[in-house]
Image (cartoon, rainbow, N blue to C red):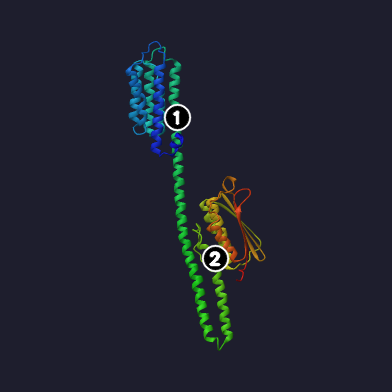
Amino acid sequence: MPAIALRSADPQTRARLIDGAVTAALLALLLWQLTTHVLLPGQRPSGPVTYLLALAMVLPFGIHRQKPLVAAAVVLGSLLVYSLAHYGPYPGINAFVLLFAITLHGERRESRAVFAATLLTLTIAIWAQPAAVATASTWFSTFLVATVAGLLGENLRHRRERWTALEERARFVEMEREERVRRAVIEERLRIARELHDVVAHAMSVIAVQSGVGHHVIDTQPEEARRALASIETTSRAALTEMRRLLGVLRQEGEPHAVLTPAPGLADLPVLVAQVNEAGLEVTVTESGEPTEASVPVDLTAYRIVQEALTNALKHGGPAAQVTIAYSPGEVYVEVIDDGHDGQVRARPANAIGHGLIGMRERVAVFQGDLVAGPRPGGGFRVAAHLPLRPVQL
């Protein structure tokens, strides 16, 4: 429970809790040493002053983040007085821990000053110890531990700064990606508005004109009226097909890589692939068969399937995707697969079979094609569609 509470606390509270715990541990250790230490020749027994100095050597650790130089001055000064008074035991661990903490959390200029002051204080403290206490190994081990504490704190601070920079960069990239998505959604809405105008306005204009012609000539020129009705039928069927496609697009929440052309097709895949590559997904395209001219709605639907599949791969899969376009007599086959995260089957949200896949299924159903979409056995996701090259008459 304490570990969970520590992880869930805000950074300032977490820092205060850690500093408090370290201070309490150091104080408990020093008090235990003072009560159990066997005096060596030349050392003085503990008294009230000893315990006051013990508090002064430990408690400033709690403010080392806010006032590192003040904390170091109090701790090292108390250590120096403690050593010159020949109290036992030798409390060097407090100086080592403080040096490590200031080097980790303070500025580099402050940490260097504290390191030099610590070495100087320890030199005087060891020199002032009775002969039975200070030996050659004491000098060596003290300076070695002090150096290791400083270097370890410096190394950890450098790593923490590097991770902070990486996290900041990741946040910036995420904000940039969200901005691109927002702009792309606006562009897609504009493109849909243009398509609606082109399809609906043109179709309604033709129907209005032809119906007017048919109304005027139905009694005198029945053949002309019949041609007008045939034109109305053809135009309304084409408009209905386009309207179904546009409604499928409108059901989506937004496609991050929309293109402002009235009707993009498979010929525009290089632009789409370049955009996705720039967003961080490595895409390869393989084409086979002899490209055959398809109707604009079919070509646009094939393009939209690739676009939606790559968008989903960019959001949930990666780091690479493969697009396959295969032409055969009468149909075009479109397949998009991605590798998933670390080779695992991609975990999709509860609404994964939502607007994107529903829109693709409805577009393919307009042309009586086939669509298969789902996780791959080896990991990742696969979208595959068979589309007739000509729209099916309704």
Residue 264 placed where, x, y %?
Answer: 54, 64
| Residue 359, quarter of the rendered image | bottom right
Give the position of the C terminus as an image quadrant: bottom right
Above or below, 279 relative to 23: below
Residue 184 placed where, x, y %?
Answer: 47, 58
Decide which of 188, 248 is in the foreground and name it: 248
Residue 60 placed where, x, y %?
Answer: 35, 28
Classify 10 Å Cα crowding around label 2: few (below 14), some (14-19), many (20 and above): many
Residue under numbered circle 2: 245
From this viewpoint, which residue is outermost toward the top?
A: 41
Name the residue at 50% across, 78% down: 208
Above or below, 226 relative to 42: below
From this viewpoint, which residue is outermost toward the front?
A: 1
Above or below, 275 relative to 13: below
Decide which of 185, 361 is in the foreground and name it: 361
Dot 2: element: helix
Name the residue at 57% across, 63% down: 362
Residue 193 placed where, x, y %?
Answer: 47, 66
Q: Which mark is residue 151?
A: 1
| Residue 392, quarter of the rendered image | bottom right
Dot 1: element: helix
